Image (cartoon, helix red, strand yellow):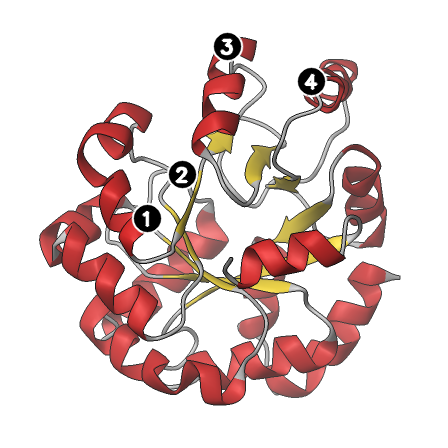
Amino acid sequence: MNRLNQLFSTKKENLLSIYFTAGYPELNTTLDIAAALEQAGADFLEIGFPYSDPVADGPTIQHSSEVALQNGMTLSVLFEQLKELRTRVSIPVLLMGYVNPIVQYGVERFCKQAAAVGVDGIIVPDLPMYEYEMLYSNYFGENNLSNIFLVTPQTSEDRIRKIDGLSNSFIYLLSSSSITGGSLKLTESIEEYYKRVKAMELNNPAIIGFGISDNASFSKACEYANGAIVGSAFVKLLGEDDYMSKIPTFINNIKG
């Protein structure tokens, strides 16, 4: 049982995850930001590793990736930074990014390094499910890493059931099929999608992401899922002056 499983076994609702890009706004602030987020009350974290072609990301996270790459952030640099992760952070931590840098780095090597520094799970939005199942699932399993699958409003019930069967921590429920950074517009069709997934009574918890930016959107997401992920709104904060001192207020405002 990794830290994610422990978390979900003890807390069932109003879970808050925060995403931020490693190496942004400065190269060496990854652990400082992670530690500050835990202290402020985040339940788990997603640390993004930058990529030059982040197709699913809106302008805020795209910009953070560009700056992080310019700052010199790479997977090798990130793993070096994360060697001290578990001396400063006790909550679950996931890495999130695109499949291309992982394949270039070597999937088996990536999983071993992630486990060695205390990472609990990986989110790779553009990793096809069949590729994971046929080629890479053993690397994740051997290293006690959870692979987090994404579900959109267009995902069929059969596929959601398949994802549920392959998952061992939580399912990432996208609030829309658009890019990150939009607002959570709870249209009738989106609400029906949330209700549909909730009614499936999946084995794994569901966490909603994309468009969560304040207490209203966080609370609404938590009506239909076990928690929610804040990304772009937090990355925007990191672009402000004196951002470290603003982290506790940001988390308090989201949780309400």
- Residue 200: assigned label: 4
- Distance between mark 1 and mark 3 Cα atoms: 24 Å
Q: Quadrant of the C terminus?
A: bottom right
Amino acid type indicated by mark 2: Ala
Q: Which residue is mark 3?
A: 158
Which residue is painted at 33% across and 61% down in the image? 49
Which residue is painted at 39% across and 87% down in the image? 84
**First of labels 4, 1 by sequence position:** 1
Q: Would residue 71 be seen by someone viewing this image from the given angle?
A: no
Which residue is painted at 51% across and 16% down in the image? 155
- Distance between mark 2 and mark 1 Cα atoms: 27 Å
Which of 140/64 is in front? 140
Q: Which residue is mark 2?
A: 56
Q: Which residue is mark 1?
A: 141
Q: Residues within 10 Å of mark 2 (few under 14, many from 20)?
A: some
Asked which secondary structure carries label 1, the reply is: helix
Asked which secondary structure carries label 4, the reply is: loop
Which residue is painted at 16% across and 54% down in the image? 108
- Distance between mark 2 and mark 3 Cα atoms: 24 Å
Amino acid type indicated by mark 1: Gly
Task: State if disc 4 and disc 2 touch (CB < 8 Å).
Answer: no
**First of labels 2, 4 by sequence position:** 2
**First of labels 2, 1 by sequence position:** 2
Query: x, y percentage for residue 3?
Result: 55, 63
Q: Residues within 10 Å of mark 1 (few under 14, many from 20)?
A: few
**First of labels 2, 3 by sequence position:** 2
Which of 57/209 is in front? 209
Q: Quadrant of residue 153?
A: top right
- Distance between mark 2 and mark 4 Cα atoms: 27 Å
